[in-house]
Amino acid sequence: MSKQDRNTSKNNNEVLSMSIKFPMSLVEKIDKYQEDYHINTRTAAIFELIRAGLGELEVKQVAPQDTTLQLPKEFLPELVRLLEKNASTADQVEENKGSDEK
């Protein structure tokens, strides 16, 4: 390993820059894991999986369930009112934007 491959991070941990080629089937599984657990980057997903495999992180057993929220029916009129109010406000902004451009 050459000296230029090694570097020191902000917190003085030694880090190594390296390029790894993954089989496409593995990349697809990593991407699915990233999506299921709402991880921002593929690199972060790979780090999490490696740390879990090394026992440094609690392994996630089951992917999170659908996070749909069900509101009681009595909230529906208020929700409709708010949506209509926001829609009319957006229309007013568009109308004002059009008059400003003239």
Image (spheres, rainbow, N blue to C red):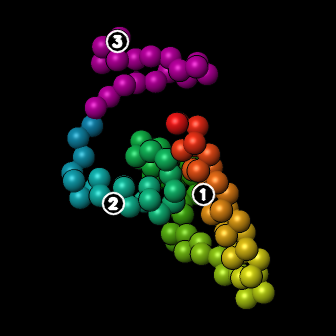
Task: Name the foreground residue: 32 vs 97.
Answer: 97
Can see residue 64? yes
Mark 3 or 2: in front is: 2
- Which quarter of the rendering shows the N terminus? top left
Q: Which residue is mark 1?
A: 91
Q: Which residue is mark 3?
A: 4
Q: Earlier in the sequence, mark 2 or mark 1?
A: 2
Residue 45, percent across and down? 45, 49
Q: Name the amino acid, label 2.
A: Lys
Position of 29 relative to 75 (above/below): above
Q: Which residue is mark 2?
A: 29
Q: Name the amino acid, label 1.
A: Asp
The residue under the point 64% across, 54% down is 92
SS of the residue at dot 3? helix
**Is residue 50 shown left or right of residue 21?**
right
Q: Name the amino acid, label 3.
A: Gln
Residue 7, percent across and down? 44, 16
Q: Earlier in the sequence, mark 1 or mark 3?
A: 3
* Labels 2 and 1 touching (C-beta < 8 A): no
Residue 84, percent across and down? 67, 70
Specify few, some or many for label 1: CA neighbours under 10 Å numbering under 14, 14-19, or 20 or more. few
Position of 2 relative to 51 (above/below): above
The residue under the point 38% across, 61% down is 32
SS of the residue at dot 1? helix
